[in-house]
Image (spheres, rainbow, N blue to C red):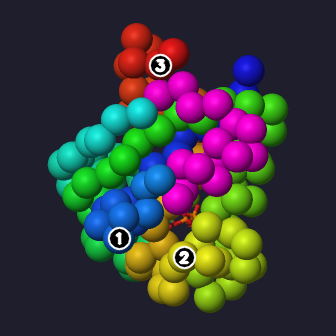
Amino acid sequence: MERTFIAIKPDGVQRGLISEIVSRFERKGFKLVGIKVVVPSKDFAQKHYHVLMERPFFNGLALVLLFAMVWEGEGVIRYGRKLIGATDPQKSEPGTIRGDLAVVVGRNIIHGSDGPETAKDEINLWFKPQELV
Ligand code: ATP
Ligand code: MG
């Protein structure tokens, strides 16, 4: 079954949005198969975002504390991105997580894998196989 990596970023954790975000994925019908709180080093966080290395904001991408999850279900990679909304919360539709709960791109509260390859890589980067249900 299809799986994706979803992480609540430090700003989302700090603002107390964990249960709100988890419940949106749960209510849709996706299944939570992995969950943990991680404090990644800056190196590790940049490894996660390695495709953005050339971008001017790369150095600011420090994931200090992160609520990491793996969700499972049919179409969960694509639909998870729909639940999350556009990267820039100013452009996210109302009804999406970023559209309803965030204002600026540097504090967009949640990450979701953007395709099947990325999902596989990110799940392997953040979770050991035995940590998943
Ligand atoms: P994510 O990978 O976090 O789910 P995304 O796939 O919607 O977000 P990416 O292009 O992968 O968007 O960018 C990764 C993250 O980098 C964004 O979520 C945001 O936190 C940050 N970012 C992207 N563009 C900008 C920008 N122009 N200025 C500041 N930060 C940015
Ligand atoms: Mg991305």
Residue 114 shows in the view? no
Q: Which residue is at a point 47% across and 53% down the rendered structure image?
A: 19
The alpha-carbon separation of the residues under discs 3 and 2 comes to 28 Å
Residue 64 shows in the view? yes
Q: Is residue 125 left or right of residue 72?
A: left
Q: What is the crowding at mark 2: few (fewer than 14 residues within 10 Å), some, or many (at least 20)?
A: some
Q: Is residue 11 left or right of residue 86?
A: left
Q: Secondary structure at mark 2?
A: helix
Type of amino acid under label 3: Leu
Type of amino acid under label 1: Arg
Q: Quadrant of residue 88?
A: bottom right
Q: Secondary structure at mark 3?
A: loop
Whether ligand 1 has any atom under 8 Å from the Cβ at mark 1 is answered as: no
* Helix, strand or loop for the magenta stretch, by majority: helix
Tell me whether circle 1 and circle 2 mark residues in contact (CB < 8 Å): yes
Which numbered disc, 1 or 2, marks the residue that appears first in the sequence? 1
Across and down, in percent, residue 63 comes to: 29, 58
**Residue bounds of the magenta highlight:** 20-34
Tell me whether circle 3 and circle 2 mark residues in contact (CB < 8 Å): no
Query: Mark 3 = which residue?
Result: 132
Query: Mark 2 = which residue?
Result: 101
Across and down, in percent, residue 20 comes to: 52, 59
The alpha-carbon separation of the residues under discs 3 and 1 comes to 27 Å
Tell me whether circle 3 and circle 1 mark residues in contact (CB < 8 Å): no
Q: Which residue is at a point 70% across and 59% down the rendered structure image?
A: 83
Type of amino acid under label 2: Leu
Which numbered disc, 3 or 1, marks the residue that appears first in the sequence? 1
Q: Which mark is residue 15?
A: 1
Q: Quadrant location of the N terminus?
A: top right
Q: Secondary structure at mark 1?
A: loop
| Residue 13 vertical position relative to residue 104 in the rendered view, above or below | above
Across and down, in percent, residue 69 comes to: 47, 38
